[in-house]
Image: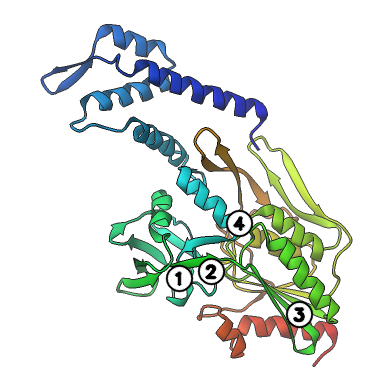
């Protein structure tokens, strides 16, 4: 987390910058000589007296305001400058959010928003990449898959560094249509989809009791309600004499770390769940208590399992608490903080630390390799499970049957 001292310094700089900008507005004098623009000597001296980086920013802002061929909006220029500062980190997870974007982001973590229901991230090739579709949403039903590259939305090209634009274009009023152009690995032609937006209500926990008293809990995302709903599901299954548990984290792109820690504490014996390290090497550990539901456990993962899902799977694997079944996970081991800029309701995410599994494994871009690898060509769905064709789930069940002595 940012220290109070650094946060205060940042606030002072923002106030100072705003004050200087307001002072210079209207006092700028530009002279055109041929095709060159010059600043009068008295104003150039003023700029040079400012701290170098800020003087450059203010000079460029004032120059555009005075000389651009059309009238510019000062606030939009400053928004663009702030957004560019975050993009300059080169970290796709460190992003500035406008007031509307920040409001949408916080609404999403609460579990409801309007859109097509997919989780995306900037890809290494520069295009917006699908981490996973959210089950039973328009994007999921349209056939969008993990790893798909989104090339255009409503005819507008979108790329990874402009992730917020892509998200804004895909969100909208329920019942309206959006055109999405996708590039899929192995496909020669672009895939063009017309998707009708819907209200995306993310019920992140689904559970049932399967045969032989084996419980099944699927977590699709970690939002503010997930740990509470998981506790309810777990208690119900225990009350129904659950003998073993399948925890399904496939296509779960992650979410709130705090929720993941609470769920891990319900499943793990006393151990380290995860530890993080910041830029100064400061280490922070999250641990579980000895009070947990002690039944045999398998965890299902695939390439759409990312971030918080990987933390939970890694803790289970390193603690030898259960068996990991499926495919190598996505590979995101960076932790983000979220802050609001209270003056206007905008906000930002920033990578504050990196995390490691209990055994010290750093899985960024590597992922977690399952104990038992089961590849699947088809996207996981309720229908696939009900039809008995979910090979990963069947393998997970077989592992548990052996542990509880069922042939």
Q: Pick the residue in front: 343 or 321.
A: 343
Is residue 142 in view from this perspective? yes
Q: Is residue 207 above or below residue 34?
A: below
Measure the C-alpha gap from mark 3 to mark 2. 22 Å
Of badges 4 and 1, the one in the foreground is 4
Measure the C-alpha gap from mark 4 to mark 3. 27 Å
Q: Pick the residue in front: 392 or 176.
A: 176
Q: Mark 3 points at which residue?
A: 215
Q: In which quarter of the image is residue 266?
A: bottom right
Residue, x 40% and y 10% (percent of image)?
Answer: 49
Q: Quadrant of residue 279?
A: top right
Measure the C-alpha gap from mark 1 to mark 3. 28 Å
Q: Mark 1 points at which residue?
A: 139
Q: Mark 4 points at which residue?
A: 110
Disc 4 or 3, which lies upstream in sequence? 4
Disc 2 or 1, which lies upstream in sequence? 2
Residue 231 point in image, percent of width and height: 77, 66
Task: Residue at the far left: name it.
Answer: 34
Measure the C-alpha gap from mark 2 to mark 1. 7 Å
Residue 73 point in image, percent of width and height: 31, 33
Q: In which quarter of the image is residue 393?
A: bottom right
Disc 2 or 4, which lies upstream in sequence? 4
Q: What element carries label 1?
A: helix
Disc 3 or 2, which lies upstream in sequence? 2
Asked whether disc 2 touches disc 1, contact meaning CB atoms under 8 Å apart, the reply is yes
Disc 4 or 1, which lies upstream in sequence? 4
Local crowd size for mark 3, using a 10 Å CA cut-off: few (<14), some (14–19), many (≥20) = many
Q: Name the residue under label 2.
A: 134
- Identify the mark at residue 299; answer none if there is no mark: none
């Amino acid at each position: 987390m940012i220290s109070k001292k650094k946060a205060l310094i940042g606030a002072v700089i923002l106030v100072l910058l705003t004050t200087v900008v307001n002072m210079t507005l209207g006092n700028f004098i530009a002279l055109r000589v041929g095709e060159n623009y010059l600043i009068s000597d008295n104003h150039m001296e003023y700029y040079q007296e400012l701290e170098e980086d800020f003087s450059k920013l203010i000079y460029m802002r004032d120059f555009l305001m005075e000389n651009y061929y059309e009238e510019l909006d000062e606030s939009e220029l400053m928004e663009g400058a702030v957004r560019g500062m975050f993009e300059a980190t080169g970290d796709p997870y460190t992003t500035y959010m406008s007031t509307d974007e920040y409001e949408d982001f916080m609404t999403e973590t609460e579990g409801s928003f309007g859109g097509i229901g997919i989780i995306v991230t900037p890809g290494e090739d520069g295009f917006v990449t699908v981490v996973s579709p959210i089950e039973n949403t328009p994007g999921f039903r349209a056939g969008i898959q993990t790893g798909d590259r989104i090339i255009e939305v409503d005819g507008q090209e979108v790329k990874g560094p402009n992730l917020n634009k892509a998200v804004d274009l895909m969100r909208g009023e329920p019942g309206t249509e959006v055109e999405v152009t996708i590039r899929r690995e192995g496909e020669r032609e672009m895939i063009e989809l017309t998707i009708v937006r819907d209200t995306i209500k993310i019920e992140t926990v689904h559970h049932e009791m399967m045969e032989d008293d084996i419980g099944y809990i699927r977590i699709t995302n970690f939002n503010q309600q997930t740990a509470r709903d998981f506790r309810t599901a777990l208690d119900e299954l225990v009350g129904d004499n659950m003998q073993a548990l399948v925890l399904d984290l496939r296509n779960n792109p992650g979410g709130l770390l705090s929720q993941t820690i609470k769920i891990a504490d319900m499943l793990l014996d006393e151990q380290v769940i995860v530890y993080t390290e910041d830029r100064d090497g400061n280490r922070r550990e999250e641990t579980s208590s000895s009070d947990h539901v002690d039944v045999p456990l398998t965890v299902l993962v695939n390439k759409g399992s990312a971030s918080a899902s990987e933390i939970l799977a890694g803790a289970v694997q390193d603690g030898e608490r259960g068996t990991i079944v499926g495919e190598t996970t996505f590979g995101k081991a960076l932790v983000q903080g979220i802050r609001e800029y209270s003056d206007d309701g905008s906000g930002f995410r920033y990578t504050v630390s990196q995390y490691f599994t209990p055994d010290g494994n750093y899985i960024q871009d590597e992922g977690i390799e399952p104990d038992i690898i089961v590849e699947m060509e088809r996207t996981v769905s309720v229908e696939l499970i009900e039809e008995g064709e979910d090979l990963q789930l069947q393998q997970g069940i077989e592992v548990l049957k052996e542990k509880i002595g069922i042939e």
